[in-house]
Image: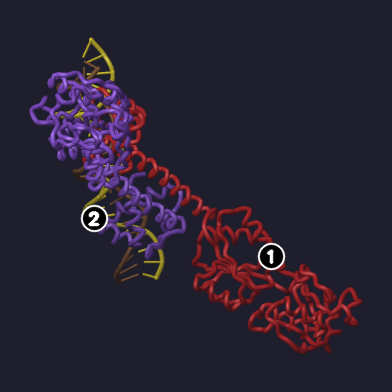
Chain colours: A purple, B red, C brown, D yellow
Amino acid sequence: MELRHLRYFRMVATELHFGRAAEKLHIAQPPLSKQIQDLEAELGFELFTRTKRSVALTPAGQVFLVEVTQIFQKLDRAIDLGRKTSRGELGKISIGFVGSATYNILPVILQQFRDRYPYVQIELHELTTDRQLIWLREGRIDIGLIRPPVIDVYLGSQVIFQESLVVALPTNHHLAVLTTIELSSLAAERFILFPRQLAPGLYDPIIAICQAAGFSPQVVQECIQMQTIVSLVSANMGVSILPASIQEAQRQGVVYKPIRSGSGAADKLATMSIFWRLSDDSPTMNRLLELALENREL
Amino acid sequence: MELRHLRYFRMVATELHFGRAAEKLHIAQPPLSKQIQDLEAELGFELFTRTKRSVALTPAGQVFLVEVTQIFQKLDRAIDLGRKTSRGELGKISIGFVGSATYNILPVILQQFRDRYPYVQIELHELTTDRQLIWLREGRIDIGLIRPPVIDVYLGSQVIFQESLVVALPTNHHLAVLTTIELSSLAAERFILFPRQLAPGLYDPIIAICQAAGFSPQVVQECIQMQTIVSLVSANMGVSILPASIQEAQRQGVVYKPIRSGSGAADKLATMSIFWRLSDDSPTMNRLLELALENREL
DNA sequence: TAAAAATACTCCATAGGTATTTTAT
DNA sequence: ATAAAATACCTATGGAGTATTTTTA
């Protein structure tokens, strides 16, 4: 049995006239009669009662017609679903991100992706840099938002966001009255930072600009969450250096101050990159990647 | 697109190897490659990612595979439904019957039909003789259980049940002590019968045997329902002559007595026939007809 | 008698086969 | 070097066309 048989059957069933049906199918009447006969022989039951002068569906033919119609609808749907999936308009994507991405690039990308591809299911995982790399390789996530540098030959990456660093001070700190902070003036301060291994891409530049300003920061506390660092600063436990986008989440007891330009060159040092498997060419991943690159802020 | 393409696609999708898939399909590898290429061209999207050494489904291919598998399941089901319908194992049948059929042949037929064809939907309509004939012609019922004679060239009929007539008497009637009743002894009684036009096939034989016994019954009351006649007899309103199967529904205050053989020849006078449209050759109707004829009681 | 489906046959498009090439491991 | 898909080309099955017959309303 082939779809041809079913297409012909449907036409004869709607026309109830072999001649007209053949005409609409752009074939001659005898081959149509033959094909219907072949179909009936294969099915093992009669589809039509022919009386040389009139054609009618048998009860079995009526039942079969309903089913066949649904089959063609289902086939159309299958083609449409496949086409949409191939264009990345349908499917699933898993995105990993470091916590600090929630203050800048991530909301922008998610909003736009949802608008453009409303039928793609998005799965979000807040993960540390090292976990993201593992999950990416294992295929548990398709996209990672990580602060470089990262070296992995199986992964592709592109910088999508760069921002300056700012100093976070308790409101009552003696430097809080200034509009910009000279980095060297923080030499004697107690610092609250991330553990280096969880976010080397953010930790290392901070240490580097301090070194350039002539001191090594004294780290008194390490916190996994950026919000916790802010809390501790507000509690007068020390000061911190954070990406500028942390200012999106204002908090009582803390003020953020730009670092005086030139003092250690703190401009655009906090970098966010998008990572993906080079072997992955799935449409949804490619659509998200395209969108992320369109929204680059460097 | 033909089912061939979909069958081939399914095999390649499960084997993920053109050579092995071709082998299982009993065709050579090159034509298989060609057919899949043709399918992809028609669909407008890639089903597989081939790297000369390995074959994998694209996301679109995965989605399409799920749908195609369901299509084949639906096709199998369509064939099965058609086959069952052609055998009369599936479908619908509408049966009309006169009230008096509920005491004899109808329960037997329904029971057996339900057992044999459990998936056929049965629709029952208690209708008078004339309404059944109209509904039969209009196709609102497929089978009628009617007491003949009926003349209609578009309908076929077969006698399926014949029974004797009995006399229904109030328990305190002076003839109720006898085991059989001589019909002529009822000449002076008040009779309760059906209206003739609603059941001529039952009314006319009753009048006929009374005439043969030498009298014309005095009808004092006409009732549409047989149960109502029995009620009135029990209430001493008169006597009646009814089909023997009324005894199935025993009732206080009424006794049934056979008519003395030879006295007007009352044997097997109440006849039930099955009627159908001659133009109807639907499998369910034929199955029910077969079954009714198997259960003939003459 | 005419309309419509079925038969009988003929032809050619294309599914499928064979031989070979290409390419990635 | 080898396995596996693609390409090139050939063969033949069967789908479709034409002419004709059969049937019944």
Q: CA distance from mark 2 to mark 1?
A: 55 Å
Front-lying residue, A9 or B102? B102
Chain name for mark 1? B
Which structural element holds mark 2? loop
* Place of residue B270 in the rendered image (x, y in percent of width and height, measured from the top left): 72, 73
Crowd class of label 2 (few under 14; some 14 to 19; many from 20; radius 10 Å): few
Crowd class of label 1 (few under 14; some 14 to 19; many from 20; radius 10 Å): many
Check the picture and name the quadrant holding the N terminus of chain A: top left
Check the picture and name the quadrant holding the C terminus of chain A: top left
Q: State whether residue A220 is above or below residue A166.
A: above
Residue drawn at the location 23% of the way across and 33% of the way down: A173
A179 with respect to B123 (left or right):
left
Name which residue type carries label 2.
His
Image mark for residue B105? 1
Front-lying residue, A41 or A243? A243
* Place of residue A22 in the rendered image (x, y in percent of width and height, measured from the top left): 28, 57
* Place of residue B249 in the rendered image (x, y in percent of width and height, measured from the top left): 77, 69
Which structural element holds mark 1? helix
Where is residue B180, by image quadrant?
bottom right
Residue drawn at the location 60% of the way across and 76% of the way down: B150
B198 with respect to A143 (left or right):
right
* Place of residue D17 in the rendered image (x, y in percent of width and height, measured from the top left): 22, 52
A65 with respect to B193 (left or right):
left
Name which residue type carries label 1.
Ile
Image mark for residue A26? 2
Residue drawn at the location 50% of the way across and 60% of the way down: B282
